Image (cartoon, helix red, strand yellow):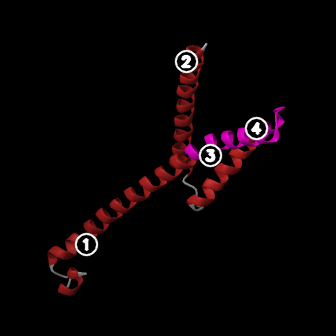
Amino acid sequence: MIPLVLFALFVLTFWLSLYTYGMFCVGRWFADRYRLRVSKQVAILIFAAASAVLAAPALLVDTGFIYKLTLVFGIWLVHTQPTAVGYWSTCEKRRIEDEVRWQKTVDAWLEPLDESGSLSEQDRDA
């Protein structure tokens, strides 16, 4: 009996990890497609509210109050955390790429001025 239970835990953990990775990919997809004009914190609150809606039907389970709250919190956490991390990490990655691209663009703009000597020594040091 115990090997069967351990096997079931292994299989469930495996599928839960795949589902969690899928939620992470959903967060990355949202960041790639809809890079919202709101702050990242507000976007994470939106993900948390949507996850709360998904977790609310677990309150209908016929168990004790503490078990219901634990189940709701677990469902909410499995949906909110990986989605928010995927969104946040992709937004940060895009922000860094934007800064690098901007720096290259500025360098390309200033290169002709620097070669012609129209920049003063004081501007070059800054």
**Is residue 54 among what the camera can see?**
no
Q: Which residue is mark 3?
A: 80
> Which one is in front, 34 or 91?
91
**Magenta residue span:** 56-83
> Which one is in front, 74 or 46?
74
User: Residue 76 at what x, y percent from top left?
Assistant: 67, 43
Work out which quarter of the rendered image holds the C terminus and state it.
bottom left
Crowding near the residue tagged with mark 4, few <14, some 14–19, many ≥20 C-alpha atoms within 10 Å: some
Q: Nearer the viewer, mark 3 or mark 4?
A: 4
Q: Quadrant of residue 97?
A: bottom left
Q: Secondary structure at mark 4?
A: helix
Alpha-carbon span between mark 2 and mark 1: 63 Å
> Which mark, by number, is residue 110?
1
Q: Nearer the viewer, mark 3 or mark 2?
A: 2
Q: Residue at x 81, y 41 (%)?
A: 65
Q: Nearer the viewer, mark 2 or mark 1?
A: 2
- Disc 1 residue type (three-letter): Leu
- Say if the magenta span includes residue 121: no
